[in-house]
Amino acid sequence: MQFKASFLLILSLLCLTCTTIKAPEPYGPLPSERQLTWHDMEYYAFIHFNMNTFTNMEWGDGSEKPEQFNPTQLDTRQWAKTIKDAGMKGVIITAKHHDGFCLWPSQYTEHSVKNSPWKNGQGDVLKELSEACKAYGLKMGIYLSPWDRNHAAYGKPEYVTYFHNQLRELLTNYGDIFEVWFDGANGGSGYYGGANETRKIDNKTYYQWDKAIAIVRELQPNAVIFGDGGPGVRWVGNEEGWANETNWCLLRRNEVYPGYQKYIELRSGHEDGTHWVPAECDVSIRPGWYYHPAEDSQVKSLAHLVKIYYESIGRNASLLLNLPVDYRGLVHENDASQLMAFKTQMDKDFSINLAAYTQVTATNVRGNSSRFEAFLVKDNNPDTYWATDDNITQAALTLSFEKPTKVNRIVLEEYIPLGQRVKAFTVEAEVDGIWKLIDEQTTIGNKRILRFDTVEALKIRVTISSAKAAITLSNVALYHAPHLLTQPVANRNLEGNVTLSVADKNIEIFYTIDGSEPSSLSTKYHDSFIINEPTTLKAIAYNPDNNEKTSTRSWYFDISKKDWKIIKISSGDISEAQKCIDDDNHSFWLSGSSSNTQNIVIDLGKVYNISGFNYVPMTGRWPVGIISQYKFYVSNDQNHWTPTAQGEFGNIKNNPIEQMITFNPVSGRYIKLEGIKLIDDAQQMSIAELDIKTR
Ligand code: FUL
């Protein structure tokens, strides 16, 4: 009896402590409810699909005609399914881009789908997308370009009324909107109803932002507003998909406006920011925002997408990944399959949270209360957190395994409803009884992920060495991600030195040069090697941890080009022409501007039996001067030329990849390539690389 009474007393005292220990006071600017909901989105899609898709442009000038908009198989359910399968939580659509064409039948303009042949003018892309989003459980957002190069009144007050009216339409007719995206690109040349002139506006005042914001608040109170300076979500200051390692959700918001000159600052935010305005990383899965068939082979590699993930979501930002829907009205197969590969990889990286197998202790627990215990960082509940006493802004958290465990990722999350606090921290691992520094970093925020070389650790310690106020961490997770297995890439320099590489240094490469299939028993790649005669190189990448391997990649290398000399070009600077025999497919030679037939003559240094040539066209975003029809000659003396091949590089405009042309062997020392027709009737010819075949 006695025992029971004292037990109850202790219990009630304990409970008293848990209830009396108050949560830390909020510190600094705080996120709103809608921003907190947005933080949970993390990864969502951008869709650039509009007039530019049909004109093959990135920015239309506004003179386009609605008749040009005519997708043949538009299927927003295919978009939504792809996006959902990819693990994204929403989609933002370019309802109107700078060219002013509207994807919905706006009652305020004729420049819209209602005057297009698509569905005889009865279609509404926004409506179809909102229905598809509902069906697949996705949230929808809208991109509405303030700049309108079509509208006759752009620059005058009437246009601003039009812009606000359209915003109302979009926010009224398509269900819940989670984000409204206002582009910072503003004012400049355009069609403007036929005026064809340059119009400047004052970015800060012209659009009456206070009114635009009030419209959003009135019609979609849960929507965040994106802009260079928010007000809800800020641009990250680049279109490459990365934030700085130091990344505050805070901004001196009143200093930032659309088209902000010091936009580089947006990559980190402002430590002394006055408002909560977190960063969103917008980046396209291809070089362009809009679909261009010529970029079908330029979908970002898996390694690149993974890097983007860790440098956006892993650095306290969200990831808005753009899919350029094609002119059929579908997410292209190449993009869809790469998205799935990306999803599979990220699922592997974060498959088992090893923190679940640890005991967690902290050097300080707020009021010694169970309400703020250290183990709450691993309870999978984002609403609970470990917190320190008010005067404690330096503290360590230790996660102890029962036995040494392999770890190479750590995820850290602050309890952001109370503000972003951490300014500096370290991560250490106890390996074989010795503490080893793994990383030293600055901010955490909503989410911070660190990648590091695998350690077999008994303990992991996170030490917050500086914070603005008491520390609050809601989540600490540990993972052992597999090595990133991607196909090897081969490069040969002018001396014939071949290097093989993969994205992850823990992955091994095995290769053959005798045409046989490589396996993990073939030669293991350590250092570069020489190939200066016709050779087929084959290689695989191999993960020694789990014996997984890639499919084989093969390359054909012919003689090395170190003795080659450019001896004549039809126009331009001969030293520049060296770039088409420098064994670098990224550099290119662009001839002088003179004619739509151009040529180049090369001395191979000695006589070879030539049985073909390989033309690598210029790639990148704005290729010019690609040869579509060619003539190829061989000579022994530069005077008498034997025409050996003539023809067309098939589909090179839409798919600018290397073109190998073979013919019956001809002996000679000099070669001449002539472009007799250039894409788009260009007056300059370009060559990224030229090779010959001697076997
Ligand atoms: C930029 C625009 O000018 C691009 O065309 C694209 O829409 C990108 C997302 O934002 O500022």
Image (tube, grey):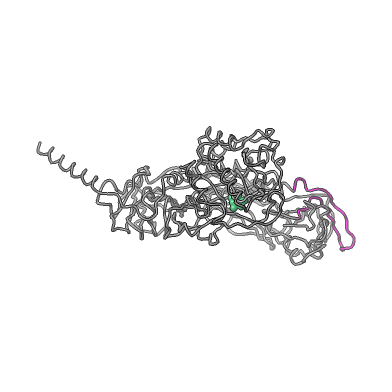
464 and 12: which is toward the camera: 12
Residue 78 visible, this angle: yes
Residue drawn at point x = 49 percent, y = 50 percent: 233
Q: Residue at x 61, y 43 (%)?
A: 335
Q: Residue at x 36, y 57 (%)?
A: 464
User: In this rendering, does residue 523 appear at all?
Assistant: no
Choose top left, top right, bottom left or bottom right for residue 587. Answer: bottom right
Q: Tell me how many marks there are.
A: 0
Q: Is residue 64 left or right of residue 642?
A: left
Name the main secondary structure of what is drawn in magenta.
strand
Q: Position of residue 167 (x, y in %)?
A: 56, 44
* Quadrant position of residue 202: bottom right
Q: Nearer the viewer, residue 318 or 217?
A: 217
Q: Nearer the viewer, residue 52 or 446?
A: 52
Q: What range is drawn magenta here?
A: 625-652
Residue occupying the far right of the picture: 640
Q: Is residue 116 above or below residue 189?
A: above
Q: Residue 650, image x and y in percent?
A: 77, 46
Residue 306 pos. (x, y %): 53, 49
Whether residue 195 is in magenta: the answer is no
Residue 444 spot, x, y in % from top left: 41, 54
**Horizontal relation, residue 130 to residue 37: left or right:** right
User: In the drawing, does residue 538 fall left or right of residue 38?
Assistant: right
Quarter the N terminus occupies: top left
Q: Nearer the viewer, residue 409 or 168?
A: 168
